Image (cartoon, rainbow, N blue to C red):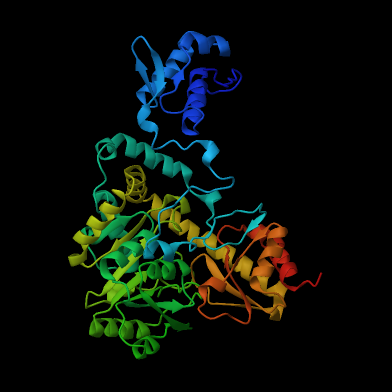
Amino acid sequence: MDLALTVQPDIETPLHRQVYDGIRTAILTGLLRPGDRLPPSRVLAGQLSLSRMTVSEAYDQLQTEGYVQGRRGSGTYVAPDLSAWVLPSATVPAGADRARPPELSPFGRRVAGAAQPNVSPVLRWDLRPNRVADDLFPWDAWEDATRTALSRHRSALVSPPPAAGLPLLREAIAAHVSRYRAVVCSADQVVVVTGSQQGLSLLAQLLLRPGDRVAIEDPGYPAARQALEAHGTTVSHVPVDTEGLRVDTLDRAGRHRLVYVTPSHQHPTGATMSLSRRLALLELAGRERMTVLEDDYDSEFRYEGSPIESLQGLDRWGQVIYAGTFSKSVLPGLRIGFVVLPEPLVEAFAAAKSLQDGGTPMMEQVVLAEFMVSGSFERHIRRMRRVYRSRRDAFLATLARELGDSVSIGPCHGGLTALVNVDALRKAEDIAARAAGKGLAVRPATAYYAVAQERSSFLIGFGGLPESQAPEAVAVLRSAALDTE
């Protein structure tokens, strides 16, 4: 039979692949039916002005994959057992959609639509949360750590990742958080995760059942709420004030299986949980057998006084799980976090981690471990603490000067973000859209609150903004928020 095929020798796809694709498409759309005989390879080669070898290669591939069968002395035929799968195009109603996607589980329905697209506008200034000063990262030290990893740890790089993480990295993490955060742990209690969000999700799988009550801060971290809701839990929103989580409100709300808190630098308000609140929360957790998940996401950057002691370091009941990340202190794209677990949970957590993804990639673990062991990590933290403090001061001073009484700023004793409230006629989302049109990215704080706020609030990241750019960035924000045009 005469096949209406064309080939284009001027494109990258090999000619035999073009012949293969054309015949395969004809079979699957019903233009060639089961049992139909294909032209001999020499005949089709002549029709297409190709070598016979090219067509023979296409026929061989089709036969290998089961689309055609060769019959000795007779020719090549469309395989007869395809009749149940091939639907002739003439029988398909115009516009009909034959796709039937799998039905989502309850978990799938809960997470559908929760993730926001990561769309980056064309920017001159980026004030979105947790941007780091990547231009000041010690790339030379990171390259040295990479070379060391390749020379000293080849056996680790060619081996499957240990379920709990690279021992050298676990030891370095345990030493760091013990020294700087007063976390009481051994390396055996540290499990490396692919980002702290994975740690939260795994803990929810291990500790929570659908319908269990969990508590989060209000305002609080949206991704934590989404992760907990995705597992079918009932989320309680507990208010936050200048001393952190209102433990008295949590106590009156009844028993919860887990409470998620950011005590050292509350996200997003910036408040620090007072010692009396910390002790009250630990007493409540011990009495009610409630797990406390302490997210210590950016505690390396404290600008006034010494770093606040971790909640885990005060725990005497074994109810606190400590979670940390390197996305703020090293690089956001590194995607390495860790959890410090009570010893009875380590084995189950590591097994769940291994089952989910087989382990965090070893190359990143080994390089990070060498970066820490060499002292480069601590030197980087000390330097960036000075840089971020200076950037914070410049940005907040400019903000107060330019917006005056129209702006109020939450506590900002540490971290890379500040909660900024603006008295404006527009909603925060409208201000953000106007700012984006002028080349400035800011994030409305709307998603952090359970109840809508009257003021237009933003969670602004100053870490990635050089001091010299603060006046221009603030001028654009002021124009987007207050100008009437």
Place of residue 307 in the rendered image (x, y in percent of width and height, measured from the top left): 40, 70
In the rendered view, does 76 fall on the left or right side of 1?
left
Q: Is residue 363 above or below residue 380?
A: above
Quarter occupied by residue 381:
bottom left
Please indicate, yes or no, whether residue 99 appears anywhere in the rendered image: yes
Quarter occupied by residue 408:
bottom right
Q: Is residue 315 above or below residue 462?
A: below
Is the C terminus in the top left, top right, bottom left or bottom right quadrant? bottom right
Place of residue 98 in the rendered image (x, y in percent of width and height, measured from the top left): 49, 47
> How many marks can you see?
0
The residue lying at 55 percent from left, 17 percent from top is: 2
In the rendered view, does 434 fall on the left or right side of 1?
right
Q: Is residue 46 above or below residue 206?
A: above
In the rendered view, does 393 fall on the left or right side of 20?
right
Between residues 89 and 419, which one lies in front from this camera angle? 89
Between residues 376 and 170, which one lies in front from this camera angle? 170
Place of residue 484 in the rendered image (x, y in percent of width and height, measured from the top left): 80, 72
Between residues 62 and 176, which one lies in front from this camera angle? 62
The residue lying at 35 percent from left, 23 percent from top is: 64
Quarter occupied by residue 389:
bottom right
Place of residue 407 in the rendered image (x, y in percent of width and height, measured from the top left): 66, 77
Please indicate, yes or no, whether residue 298 appears anywhere in the rendered image: no
Q: Residue furthest right?
A: 485
